Image (spheres, coloured by chain):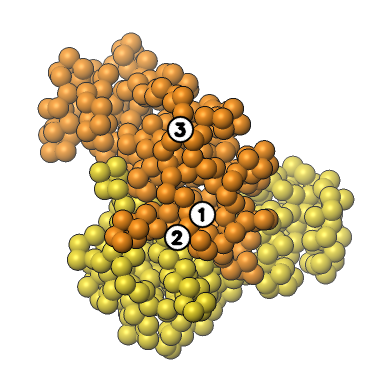
Chain colours: A orange, B yellow
């Protein structure tokens, strides 16, 4: 494995530049840490490049990652160089340079899916991706104005969910509506029925909205189902969008599991 | 209202010092922004001190807050001074200095409650407090090692939930167990039953654990119920702790609502 100890090495310079701008459309990104790199390997195979902290190559989980990537794609960096690339202070000694998949836009959407309507907070977006994947959702559409899915913070809170999902970014959700062959379901306060009354569609397009403003009124109008989560409104006005999505997606999953058992 | 324009004013210096150390045990804290200040007023009445951006006192929501606090407790600060106290870049022109309530430890716990077992991330702790309040929980116990409930980040993501809850901090959860008169319920992977099979207790003590390590084995052993959320394990290993808690607490709420309807 090639070993680099100079900050002026062109490969290190390119990586450092990338670490600062990750998340830009179409550009490669750095996956930071053992868990994300393992998840990438499992779903997509070898990365464009694997970068290791030379002092931690003997650590078993890192050695296993190094063994799984062709040597020509591996670089060993001095610890201080590696540290300068890490997105968190406690770098884990490994990062993969990868090109995020760009899934083809389906002509018709007939599966369970989730629409992210300008969700701002990277932690919320990452958690929501993780919840979607956990609920068995395979495809998500992120409106323009949503935090960049492949940024370091979203990747970190996604915990590998990115690799189990087809993620469509920079989407005009209104323009997407004619492609939907499943009902559009939105969470709302006005004119919404209790989430727990009646049956949810087995497959639908859920839309979850902006932290402050909620779902875009145009999308709300287009929704065939509006549901509200019956919470203690005297205590707090609303739920966090990630919590609300978890409750909705897993209520749908609960109903689906219950029906399969019948 | 007293107007201050000097950074060297003792009151401003004291506030600036506090803004940097908020969240320390027993000390007063700064509530930042219109929503938190409104929620404090609604639940606890006037703050120890209310601080306003002098240029925004004519804004209706801020004027309403100023009118609700006795003038002797109000300070108007020059914008740049106010900005230096704000915990986020976009300060909202108002902050309350308050002393967090310290609820008395109950001798016996016989109500629905939640135990936070060393949850590290302030955003997770705040979201979890908000979810607890929304689910109708009134009392929470935060283990030593959990992010400080009254820190600026946790307050921000709690969105007012703090004022609807009795929050016990720095708790030894193991020592709390003998006081519990309700069953202890933990989320777990091994030896756990499906959350959706069978009935959950109407009242219990939920314990949610550390983001990486999960629930402390001692608490897991002590739990009379261990439940798991049936998620797509091929997609992601686990759920975010806030998402998992939302699913559990609202499944309990769904069951309670369904039984009340019978």
Q: Which residue is mark 1?
A: A244
Q: Does the CB distance between marks 1 and 2 fall below 8 Å?
A: yes
Q: In the picture provided, is B89 more to the left or to the right than A160?
A: right
What chain is tagged by disc 3? A
Q: Secondary structure at mark 2?
A: helix
Mark 3 or 1, closer to the camera: 3
Q: Secondary structure at mark 3?
A: loop
Mark 2 or 3, closer to the camera: 3
Image point 34% across, 60% down: which residue?
A258
Q: CA distance from mark 3 to mark 1?
A: 23 Å
- x%, y% of residue B262? 49, 79
Q: Does the CB distance between marks 2 and 3 fall below 8 Å?
A: no
* Mark 1 on the same chain as mark 2: no
Q: Nearer the viewer, residue A140 or B164?
A: A140
Image point 80% across, 46% down: which residue?
B78
Q: CA distance from mark 2 to mark 3?
A: 28 Å
- Is residue A89 something that shows in the picture? no
Q: Which mark is residue B246?
A: 2
């Amino acid at each position: 494995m090639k070993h680099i100890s100079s900050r002026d090495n062109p490969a290190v310079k390119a990586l450092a530049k990338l670490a600062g701008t990750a998340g830009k459309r179409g550009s490669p990104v750095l996956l930071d840490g053992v868990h994300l790199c393992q998840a990438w390997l499992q779903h997509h195979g070898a990365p464009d490049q694997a970068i290791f902290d030379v002092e931690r190559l003997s650590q078993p989980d890192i050695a296993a990652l190094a063994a799984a990537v062709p040597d020509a794609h591996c670089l060993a960096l001095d610890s201080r160089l590696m540290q300068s690339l890490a997105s968190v202070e406690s770098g884990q000694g490994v990062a993969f340079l990868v090109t995020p998949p760009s899934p083809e836009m389906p002509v018709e959407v007939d599966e369970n899916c989730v629409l992210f309507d300008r969700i701002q907070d990277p932690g919320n977006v990452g958690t929501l991706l993780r919840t979607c994947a956990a609920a068995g959702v395979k495809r998500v559409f992120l409106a323009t104005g949503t935090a960049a899915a492949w940024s370091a913070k979203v990747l970190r809170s996604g915990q590998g969910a990115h690799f189990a999902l087809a993620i469509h970014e920079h989407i005009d959700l209104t323009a997407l509506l004619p492609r939907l062959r499943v009902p559009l379901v939105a969470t709302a306060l006005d004119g919404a029925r209790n989430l727990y009354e009646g049956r949810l569609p087995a497959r639908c397009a859920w839309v979850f909205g902006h932290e402050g403003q909620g779902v875009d009124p145009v999308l709300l109008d287009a929704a065939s189902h509006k549901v509200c989560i019956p919470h203690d409104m005297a205590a707090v006005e609303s739920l966090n969008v990630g919590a609300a999505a978890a409750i909705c997606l897993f209520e749908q999953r609960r109903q689906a599991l219950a029906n399969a058992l019948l």
